[in-house]
Amino acid sequence: MTELTAHSSEQDAESGAERAAARVRDGATKAFYLKTFGCQMNVYDSESMMDALAADGYVATDAIEAADLVILNTCHIREKAAEKVYSDLGRIRDIKSERRKAGKGTVITVAGCVAQAEGAEIVRRQPAVDLVVGPQSYHKLGDLISRAAASKTSIIETEFATPEKFETLPDKPRKAGSPSAFLTVQEGCDKFCTFCVVPYTRGQEFSRPVAQILSEARRLTDGGACEITLLGQNVNAYHGAASDGAQLSLAGLVTELAKIDGLQRIRYMTSHPRDMDDDLIAAHRDIPQMMPYLHLPVQSGSDAVLAAMNRKHTAREYIDLIARVRAARPDIALSSDFIVGFPGETDADFEATMALVREVQFAQSFSFKYSTRSGTPAAALENQVPEDVKSHRLLTLQALLENQQVAFNAAAVGRTLPVLFERTGREPGTLVGRTPYLQLIHADGSPSLVGKTVPVTVTAYRQMSLTGSVDTVIAAA
Ligand code: 5AD
Ligand code: SF4
């Protein structure tokens, strides 16, 4: 999944922000600052937390020095992501002591996967932290914050209670009016890839019931969403209970979602090759709302490395699967995650990854150096790959992946594609949207086109984005 940081500034821009800020200055309302690390699941969880805090009377602030409550929603997937949290916490501790001198309290909260994985260790490394709360306990957040504010000792809450979390968190449109929304349908993972912390931080696979998802999707579309991305660590392992007691696969769920008026685009991520069943592949052919984009991580092209990673498929099986997906939807854009330098990876193994990439041709990809995560089986392997070898392989792989991304974008030039405009651009009169293939595209046009899908002719490309032109009659609409 893409790594990104988001914080509460978008909320701040919403109506009433000025009044709320005045109430904070008067001391009548409490302000929170929230920073999100990691994947889209964390972005979704952060939005839920913001909704719950707003319901408790908190307002979002961009100014961390003005925050009565600071929340870091953290990521544990690689060492770099986890260590960043501790450097941020050092800075926040200093702000907390400055505020204390002014007679103001600050509740420092660490949420997310570092919280789940490291628990009390966080408070040992940074005693200024008041509350550590894992992703399965966000429904208790308000109560935990009150207790942490009143208590002299830190509170650690890392229970696993996924069903209650989804039943209790406010189920309402987030960021009303946003044309593109995330919806978590599945959480956790039972695959136990030997490099990965997710089965330990997010727990066992859990699928939300169908009715709960459909009602949240309807609320999102009523609030202006025309695109929904279904999220899950292993989203295509989805097997949720329908009202009639039957179990629906992801294909079944997508079929139900496609009946919702106004829902024009359905996406999903992240998938595992072993859960890519025939029905889901057929849905790419048969359901018009299914976007022609598939993020299907392969991690490596070497059978020996795939086996050591416990991926439970071979490189050939992955390539054959891709052929079946392309037979169903020939124009589909493919994306993947790769890890280089997994313990024991030889030059020949790495070459096999390069060969797989050349054969498949990806539109977009995410690639990482293997990062040792304590507690995972791969961490105990002896034949770790030296850092300089990992770095060299990463650069080599990324050069190839970048070429493929550029080629994919270049092929769009001259085509007219339906673009969903998501927001206005930085310059007045500009818009930013996405093609069906998830390419970011910039074009000139009236702000009234935000939330609309219009034909756009692609005029230029870069590695990460396209430029296009909207028909002049539509652009002025
Ligand atoms: N080291 C490097 N990359 C990792 N990923 C997961 N765990 C690790 C690790 N220990 C990558 C995988 C996964 C993506 C979300 O992060 O490629 O698909
Ligand atoms: Fe991690 Fe593997 Fe599960 Fe993906 S499938 S979340 S890589 S254990």
Image (spheres, helix red, strand yellow):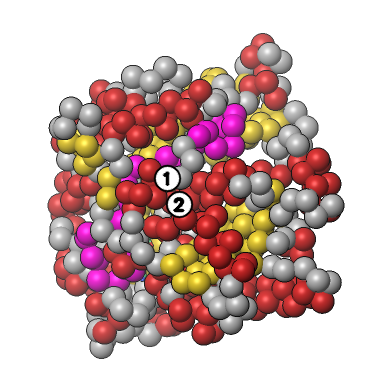
Under tag 2, what secondary structure?
helix
Taking the magenta stretch, the answer to whether it contains residue 459 is no
> Answer yes or no: do the residues labelled 1 and 2 have beta carbons within 8 Å?
yes
Q: Which mark is residue 139?
A: 2
Residue 198 on image: x %, y %: 33, 63
Residue 311 on image: x %, y %: 20, 62
Front position in the image: 458 or 381: 381
Name the quadrant of the C terminus.
Answer: top right
Query: Local crowd at mark 1 within 10 Å, few (<14), some, or many (≥20)?
Result: few
Depicted 219 relative to depicted 355: above or below: above
Residue position for label 1 = 168
Front position in the image: 314 or 128: 128
Query: Which of the 4 quarters of the picture holds residue 421?
Result: top right
Q: Which residues are magenta?
A: 172-198
Ligand 1 visible in quadrant: bottom left
Task: Tell me what residue is drawn at x 63 percent, y 22 percent.
Answer: 449
Magenta portion: prevailing SS class: loop
Depicted 96 relative to depicted 181: above or below: below
Task: Tell me what residue is drawn at x 43 percent, y 63 percent.
Answer: 134
Name the quadrant of the N terminus.
Answer: bottom left
Query: Which of the 4 quarters of the picture holds residue 314?
Result: bottom left
Residue 81 in view: no
61 left or right of 183 in image: right
